[in-house]
Image (tube, rainbow, N blue to C red):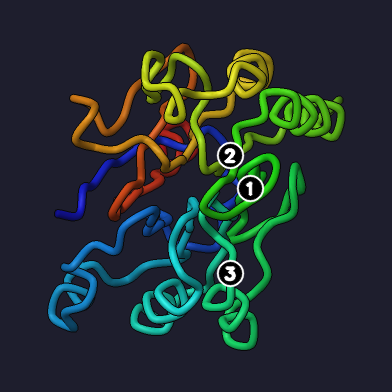
Amino acid sequence: MTHHIALEWPNPKPFRDRGGASIRLLVVSDAVDPALMDLRNREVLSPIDLIVGCGDLDRSDLAFIADGLNAPLVYVNGNHDSGERWAAGASYCPEPIRSSAVQHHTGLAIAGLPWPGAWGKRAARSERSAWTQALSLAVRRLGRSEPLLIISHVPPFGAGDMPDGGYHRGFRGYRWLMDRLAPPLWLHGHTPLAATSDWYVEVGQTTLVNATGAVVVELLPPKASST
């Protein structure tokens, strides 16, 4: 099942040359949504302006989705993104966002927080590495008022995670970062949908979306700019 959510984006700049049209993101993570394998379903979802990957999907799957929807791709690594099959996809898939880096796509400033630490079957959690990511991004954003869209594999602590879920709990450094930067939108994976009743939550000024499977996120121009 492909979820859908529409949100007002606070910055009018990305919409200036779109004739009032929204910006449509397809966000994927952890498990391929079977609906995306069918051409008819992809046609219903179109147009998509950007594919966003939140980790733990093979590069071959990411490339297939991006090609099938004729949309550019941006993504972060998850804890399972390693091994020969992952490496083999490097020739037909762009590189993931580096830790705490900020890229611009479709007029949006997008920051990436990949799994902090080693990857693979025994990828250990590292609160210390998550804090390093959070502090680095906070310093990078000093003095910048541009709204930020954050994509990560793991959510912030107590916001879309499993606080009592051990390996699937959020990072405290990410929660500090969210409270400090107040990004309008934070996209993540990692949290099993079967273990939570909500695939999106609102905490303060931030909407957090669990993209496990697939979610269409429609960003709407701010109302003040459309009057």
Tell me the SS state at disc 1.
strand
Question: Of discs 3 and 1, which sits in the foreground?
Answer: 3
Q: Residue at x 53, y 73 (%)?
A: 72
Tell me the SS state at disc 2.
strand
**Vertically, is 205 above or below 198?**
above
Q: CA distance from mark 1 to mark 2?
A: 6 Å
Who comes first in sequence, dot 2 or dot 3? 3
Judging depth in this view, the residue of 135 and 184 nearest the camera is 135
- On the image, the x and y values in percent for residue 1 come to 14, 54
- On the image, the x and y values in percent for residue 223 come to 40, 33
Q: Counting other residues with Cα less than 10 Å from the Cα at mark 3, is it few (<14), some (14-19), or many (20 or more)?
A: few
Give me the disc on residue 150.
2
**Vertically, is 68 above or below 15?**
below
**Which corner quadrant holds the C terminus?**
top left
- Asked if labels 2 and 1 touch by Cβ distance under 8 angstroms, the answer is yes
Say which residue label 3 marks. Answer: 83
Q: Counting other residues with Cα less than 10 Å from the Cα at mark 2, is it few (<14), some (14-19), or many (20 or more)?
A: many
16 displayed left or right of 194: right
Amino acid on which disc 2 is placed: Ile
Amino acid on which disc 1 is placed: Ile
Q: CA distance from mark 2 to mark 3?
A: 26 Å
Whether residue 21 is visible here, answered yes or no, is no
Give me the disc on residue 110.
1
Q: Counting other residues with Cα less than 10 Å from the Cα at mark 1, is it few (<14), some (14-19), or many (20 or more)?
A: many
Whether residue 9 is visible here, answered yes or no, is yes
In the rendered image, the residue lying farthest to the front is: 122
**Vertically, is 58 above or below 27?**
below
Q: Residue at x 68, y 15 (%)?
A: 180
